[in-house]
Amino acid sequence: MREGWLDRFADAPDVLIGARRPRTIVPVLDAAIGGDEFVTMAGPCSVETEFQLLATALHVRRAGARILRGGAFKPRTSPYAFQGLGLEGLKLLAHVREETGLAVITEVMSECDVAMVAEYADILQIGTRNMENFSLLEAAAQSGRPVLLKRGMAATIADFLRSAQVILDHGNPNVILCERGIRTFETAMRNTFDAGAIALIKEITHLPVIADPSHAAGDRAMVPALARIAVAAGADGLLVEVHPNPAKAWSDGEQSLDFAGFDAMMAELAPWIELKGRRGRELQPATSEACSLEAVG
Ligand code: PEP
Ligand code: MN
């Protein structure tokens, strides 16, 4: 790495790549993030109902996703919008993990909730609005669960890496960075997807980097294109919103892919992932899916 980079990120020394820390691979159930597999995390923005979550989980698993996403605690732009199911949502996530074998990632918004969320989730997600909530970062670090840290919407790369350093400092090596778009003068898309940040962070740090094309795009039409850019930039995986009926989603429907859209994106990405020398999805055989869905009613 060039000397200049070391100076610029001097406040995040343990995040930087070096002979002692060539690469961090984060184990999550039977998946590994940051290794040679490109890992897709997919699911609804918010956990709504058992049917919604289980149907989505079964579908994304079959299309090659390894991890189920879904928010139970939702930091919404409007205080009057749906705020999430809370504990009930966590229980649904854990139930669907039992049914599908998929690991679960969900957001924790408050340090007071860390113990509860960590009981149900395999990865704790720290949202963009909380990237510099240092007491939350400390508590999340100490939970012992892997932490996916989203870049603050107005955070520089140096700010982002400093927050990752806080998690490492509190004894948790399993940090996954997530680029989800930042606010700029450009308003055509919900956020400006900073693909350059992915390339740079992969170059200078040993941590896995995941891209969230959904919150960057704000519109499902652009999600596959941003996902492809993320693969090319060297991302280790994706965090994508998928909903059985986006028009009826309780949050972020406009940017959620439907099942067919998710399938198309996964198929389209496969050769790009291969080109980067990564192992992509392993298509799962259709199992007793129909039975599981029948059980839900
Ligand atoms: C989310 O993943 O649903 C979410 C709220 O993301 P962000 O924190 O990036 O806005
Ligand atoms: Mn969302």
Image: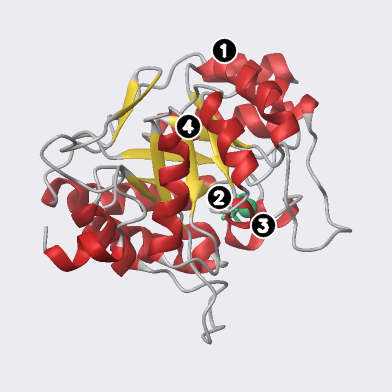
Residue 29 position within the rendered picture, expressed as x and y whole percent measured from the top left: 40, 17
Closer to us: 93 or 131: 131
Closest to the camera, between mark 3 and mark 2, is: 3
Residue 98 image label: 1
Disc 3 marks a residue whose amino acid type is Asp
Q: Which residue is mark 4?
A: 170
Q: Residues within 10 Å of mark 1 (few under 14, many from 20)?
A: few
Residue 25 image label: none
Are dots 2 and 1 in contact, CB under 8 Å?
no
Q: CA distance from mark 3 to mark 4?
A: 33 Å
Residue 219 position within the rendered picture, expressed as x and y whole percent measured from the top left: 56, 67
Q: Earlier in the sequence, mark 2 or mark 1?
A: 1
Q: Earlier in the sequence, mark 1 or mark 4?
A: 1
Q: CA distance from mark 3 to mark 2?
A: 12 Å
Q: CA distance from mark 1 to mark 4?
A: 30 Å
Q: Residues within 10 Å of mark 2 (few under 14, many from 20)?
A: many
The reply to whether residue 1 is in sight is: yes
Disc 2 marks a residue whose amino acid type is Asp
Q: Earlier in the sequence, mark 2 or mark 4?
A: 4
Q: Earlier in the sequence, mark 3 or mark 4?
A: 4
Residue 252 image label: 3
In the depicted structure, whether residue 107 falls above or below residue 12? above
Residue drawn 49% across and 46% down?
149
Q: CA distance from mark 2 to mark 4?
A: 39 Å
Closest to the camera, between mark 1 and mark 4, is: 4
Q: Is residue 181 left or right of residue 231?
A: right
Q: Is residue 228 left or right of residue 88?
A: left
Are dots 1 and 3 in contact, CB under 8 Å?
no
